[in-house]
Image (cartoon, rainbow, N blue to C red):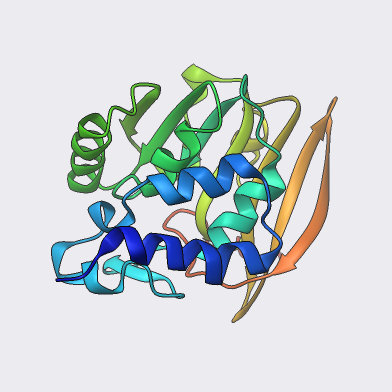
Amino acid sequence: MQDYAVAREYMVDCQVRPSDVTRYGIVDAMLEVPRERFVPSSKRSVAYAGEAVELTKGRWLLDPRVFAKMVDSAEIEPGDDVLDIGCALGYSSAVLSRLCRSVIAVEGDEGMAKAAEETLSSLSCDNVAVLTGAMEEGADSEKPFDVIMIQGGVGDVPDALFDQLAEGGRLVAVWMEDSFGQVRVSTKSGPSISHRWIFDAAAPIMPGFTKKAAFAF
């Protein structure tokens, strides 16, 4: 039988720390949260592998390195309110819940949202609320958010999500162009959004976040 605690420690020591993720809060959270609880039982043996895990058709759990570096780049503070888009079975929300004041998790798949809610509750993640709805719409009724995390690739991000950022708020996502991608942090300053490239990464594009067709005469 696999020792998941050992696998978790190995994941952090061999995938997270070598990627220059040194914030103690992130490291501690990823050591604490049982990643195997947030994948289908048939995939638990690969929960800690250094690659994304397919949860269901078209939906993936980001690989530990990419996820950790995204969280690190968000610069989450203990008093922050975070919107976690595409939480799937809840792993990202469980980690984020240990770093901030509150997490609103939005998931488009009703079955996954229910499973996420149950697992998060069983782990006493009491500052997380899971909402079922269109992921590209976010959670307008709960805004503003200090941080918005998108747990997958995007071709475009709707303006509605940037509107849900607080002043100085950061949106972190993997922006994809064909098979290539970059993690960018988009920061709100007044009416403007500035984008900053952080590192190269790739992730399947999330439902609702495909690139808009360019207008042509």
User: From this viewpoint, is residue 152 visible?
Assistant: yes
| Quarter of the N terminus within the rendering | bottom left
Residue displayed at 61% across by 24% down = 78
- Left or right: where does residue 207 sit relative to residue 14? left
Q: Is residue 73 above or below residue 93?
A: below
View extreme (bottom): residue: 179
Q: Nearer the viewer, residue 215 or 100?
A: 100
Q: Position of residue 98 (x, y in %)?
A: 48, 33
| Quarter of the C terminus within the rendering | bottom right
Q: Nearer the viewer, residue 207 or 195?
A: 195
- Left or right: where does residue 14 sit relative to residue 206? right
- Left or right: where does residue 192 sit relative to residue 29? right
Residue displayed at 64% across by 57% down = 69
Q: Position of residue 132 (x, y in %)?
A: 30, 35
Q: Is residue 136 above or below residue 213?
A: above
Q: Position of residue 213 (x, y in %)?
A: 61, 65
Residue displayed at 73% across by 56% down = 184
Residue displayed at 23% across by 47% down = 112
Number of disc labels: 0
User: From this viewpoint, is residue 216 visible?
Assistant: no
Q: Position of residue 160 (x, y in %)?
A: 60, 34
Q: Is residue 95 above or below residue 42?
A: above
Q: Nearer the viewer, residue 59 or 209?
A: 59
Q: Is residue 133 above or below residue 176?
A: above
